[in-house]
Image (cartoon, rainbow, N blue to C red):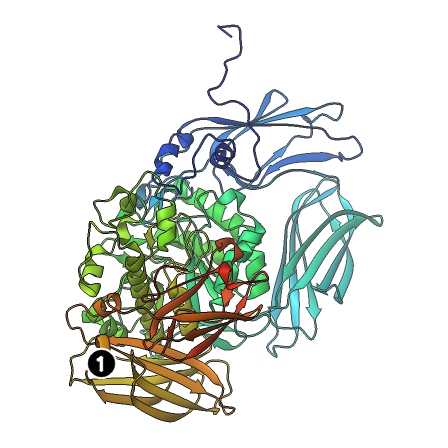
Amino acid sequence: MELGHEIIPAIGHMKASIPGSVQTDLMANGWLKDPNVGLASLDGEWVDNREWVYETNFSISDDWLQERCELVFEGLDYSGEIYLNGSKVAGFEGMFIPVRLDITDRIRTNGSNRLLVVFHAAPDIDGQFGYSNQIRKLKSRFNYAWDWCPRIVPVGIWKDVYLQTYSEVKINDFYPNAMVGDNMIDGHVRFRTEVTVQRRGPYTISYKVMTDQGEQKEIAVHTKELECGKGCIEYELAVADIALWWPNGYGNQPLYKVEIDIANDSHSICHDMKLIGFRKVEFINNPNSPESALPYTLVINGRSIFMKGVNWVPIRPFYGDVKADEYANYLGRFKDMNVNILRIWGGAIIEKQDFYQYCDANGLMVWQELLQSSSGINNTPPDDSKFLDDLEQVAIYAIKEKRSHPSLVIWCGGNELMWEGFKPVDERHANIARLKKVVEEFDPGRGFLPTSASGPSFNANVKHMGNGLHHDVHGPWLYLESDHYEFFNKDDSLLLSEMGTPGISRAENIEKYAIGCSAWPPTKENPYWVHRGAWWIQWEQLNRLFGEWSRDHNELQIYSQASRYVQMESLRYAIEATRRREPYASGFIIWMGNEPFANNSNTSVIEYDGMVKPAYYAVKNAFSPLHISAKYDKVNFSEGERFSCQLYLHDELGTNGQTFDVQAEIVGIDGTVYKQERFTCTSEQLATQAGELDWIVAEAPYSLFFLRLQVRDKGNTVVSSNTYLYSLDLLSPYRPLRQLPKASLVVELMREEQLQIRNISDITAVGVMIQEKEASRFTSFDHNYLYIFPGESVTIKCSMQPMDTVEQLIINGFNIGLPS
């Protein structure tokens, strides 16, 4: 007003994508670099410190507009003001509850409407380091810097925006609660519908239950007098001969389409639809667990389910523009990895409907945390009264939005919430007590955990094993080297909801993103590595395990192989040891499944672009329903020492009493078989000892030998296999892997879905990994990361877009040479 002309903004108009973020629009218009490149994320930190305006113009017609009209923003991140046609309609704050505005008296039908959404600068929130008890705002916290994501704080409209018009009655919440009868054959749906009534009177309410193919199962119609204002309509409908919903690997996931229609004088005035699944969820105590322990064993439809899981975080920092096909790609990776549960980590978001819909349709159960996390300096959740009121409202909205999904099985107060001394909190804390009460009121049929980890101890300690102190624990997050095997052989935890080990990204990706930076050496003195995974730099450990690395000579290719091998070995043994303790152990959830940023090093088993690490295939095998494993104490031996291991067979889905043949071989790297034994094993659903193998360690070429296990059914078909590597190097057990001569492989495309790999050399090809050149193809192989002995041939089945030539693949390994 003082100058008499419009101020020209530093950054002018540009096209915005909704849902999305200011940052993704700036990148699309050339104002920001890709934060995954080099140190570029540092150059984008100004964005969330500015104010931004979204603008649009729209028109509506008289025949569309009914008695009332609402403008709905499903997700605004984080605070600001909304203007319509030159007037302020409302202010807003918070990203997890929709902003719903009555604009009946403000909207125009005789011209264009101008809508402005002004975003204030993002609030200052503690990232990984800070004070949990001082947090006063509910905003996704990983964006403020965590060990697996630098500071990238999105601003903008991260969910859908729409107009809703209605007359007489509006449905606010439609909740069809699917219940299963004791006979596991019949069910019923308990409908609860919250409405706002504008006009009092009798209304005809119709309910339908159909299969997801459209076949009608049940229908009911009744008339009800509705009073003005907010109210609730309840009804129960029996459904005979239901098909049960099962977790991934245990059965199918049939879904049913349920609908409600409210009509006046045979004219439909409002309608809603949801997909449901019939399953019975229970949690029971682990056998012989302490009296104070929570029930951690998950039972679905009367059957105990060992939780095989990963911890899930957003696919990228800009969670608003993640599409349904991206969810399908990443979640599909975990489905193929034999995962049956995803823990949605508490410091991020309540995931979007596309995520839940995929999980419903594919049997991936969900453990949803309620937006709280530890902060390092102080980990106790806030008890400020206003914050607790805000948290309660967010929790109520999340529960109402998600509770009809059959995939959802657990609500949790948050991640690593603890009193002083690393003691996990429980409902004695006002924060957790409030959340537990909300879950019991709005979703009583599901499990609730106060935090993860829970119980008397945050993590397991070898000194305290056997004392009943380890309930749901976190850690360790690294390979414990010579102590690793003893730790997991002795572990007495009831549940491991976080355990992980770092493994670096593939070398070509690290080099691709190193624009303006040095990809070598991977040390704490290299800013490129510090910025992209400082917590998970393994330089010292890999020097101990593999021998000294040169700081001056770039060895990134073989260093990558080394890091990824350690991650694979660490996770594989930890999972197998935990499964051998079932039912005393209820599950194993890896930290972490995916990552939202292209880290150089991280504990994820899937890289940022969707490419899998070798650990992925080791975990896939360790999580498989039929699995053979070996229990041993260490990996390096001296000549003349006794090597001993016990063999265990899991037949999770088979019929008890089925007979299998187990073959165990000690094999040298040149293919020499030093010892071979066969065992006959009668399977059970829990771990069954199949045999024990002893061998006096002899001199072996390149100081390496293998234990190869194969399980054959009555038809002599190999139905499970496993290979373990051991060393005669007592100082650096994996140093021999750096000194192997090259193996020669021949790769042939047999059919579109099969590859045959032959080793035509006289030395074993170690760690053979088949990868697609283009990560976007999301190839899935039935097995991978192979040990192919001299003269042997291996066939791999894959599913992907049609493959015409092996040139679409990359093959690498310890002694395969550079990727080819």
Residue 792, image quadrant: bottom left
Residue 254, image quadrant: bottom right
- Which quadrant would the C terminus be assigned to in this image? bottom left
Which residue occupies 28% across, 58% down?
A: 559
Rendered location of residue 566, percent (x, y): 29, 65
Which residue occupies 46% across, 30% down?
A: 31
**Secondary structure under badge 1?**
loop
Rendered location of residue 578, percent (x, y): 34, 74
- Left or right of 311: which side holds 500? left
Rendered location of residue 191, percent (x, y): 66, 59
Of all residues shown, which one is farthest toward the right? 265
Which residue occupies 51% across, 31% down?
A: 29
> Pointer 1: what residue?
700
Numbered disc total? 1
Instruction: Between residue 754 and residue 112, name the one nearer to us.
Output: 754
Instruction: Between residue 464 and residue 148, name the one nearer to us.
Output: 148
Instruction: Between residue 591 and residue 34, name the one nearer to us.
Output: 34
Is 228 situated above or below 454?
Answer: above
- Left or right of 615: which side holds 55? right
Rendered location of residue 737, percent (x, y): 26, 68
Is 584 situated above or below 442?
Answer: below
Residue type beneath disc 1: Ala
Which residue occupies 41% across, 38% down?
A: 153
Kindly tell me whether residue 466 is visible in this rendering.
no
Q: Residues within 10 Å of mark 1 (few under 14, many from 20)?
A: some
